[in-house]
Amino acid sequence: MATIAATRKSRLHNALEGLALTATLQSFPTFATSAFLLKLCGDHDLVGDPGVAIFVAFASFTHALIAVTLGPSFPHLFKTVYEPKFFEAHLSLSDKITAWRTQPVASLQLVTIVLLLSVMAVVAASVG
């Protein structure tokens, strides 16, 4: 059943899936962490400003778009951002995430992000 659905997936649909996965799983944590670090460092311009969310979303999308565009041409420069498994048309969306998640490098990235965000949350809660 999954193979039938995967064969009917258009190139555009596959490209959009890959772009969305790159933006969500690889670019978004970087920019969200940056915004949170700025807030923790005392940048009062960020407090209650909806522009922060817009910046994080726009920066994540732009970063992913650049990585997806240039990643296949320059894999040595984009090895931490561009994931070829996100663009394999025969995989379903959940299979793409599973294939990425089971790689040792991706696992290390996820653990690092979780630990960093946990420490920052504790600092934010203790500072006020």
Image (spheres, rainbow, N blue to C red):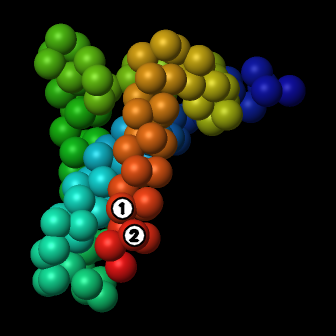
Residue at 46% x, 51% y is 118
For residue 72, above or below residue 39: above
Which quadrant would the C terminus be assigned to in this image? bottom left
**Can you tell which quarter of the image residue 115 is in?**
top left
Label 1 sits on a secondary structure element that is helix
**Can you tell which quarter of the image residue 123 is in?**
bottom left
Q: Which amino acid does label 2 sit on?
A: Ser
Which numbered circle lies on residue 123? 1
Labels 2 & 1 near each other (Cβ < 8 A): yes
Query: CA gap, disc 2 to disc 1?
Result: 5 Å
Q: Is residue 48 left or right of residue 4?
A: left
Residue at 29% x, 46% y is 30
Foreground pick, 47 / 52: 47
Query: Where is residue 55 drawn, in percent x and y?
Result: 22, 68
**Can you tell which quarter of the image residue 8 is in?**
top right
Query: Where is residue 10 drawn, in percent x and y?
Result: 55, 35
For residue 126, above or below residue 90: below
Residue at 23% x, 33% y is 67
Q: Which residue lies furthest to the bottom in this view?
A: 48
Label 2 sits on residue: 126
Foreground pick, 1 / 86: 86
Residue at 36% x, 56% y is 120
Which quadrant would the N terminus be assigned to in this image? top right
Q: How many labels does the image show?
A: 2
Foreground pick, 54 / 92: 54
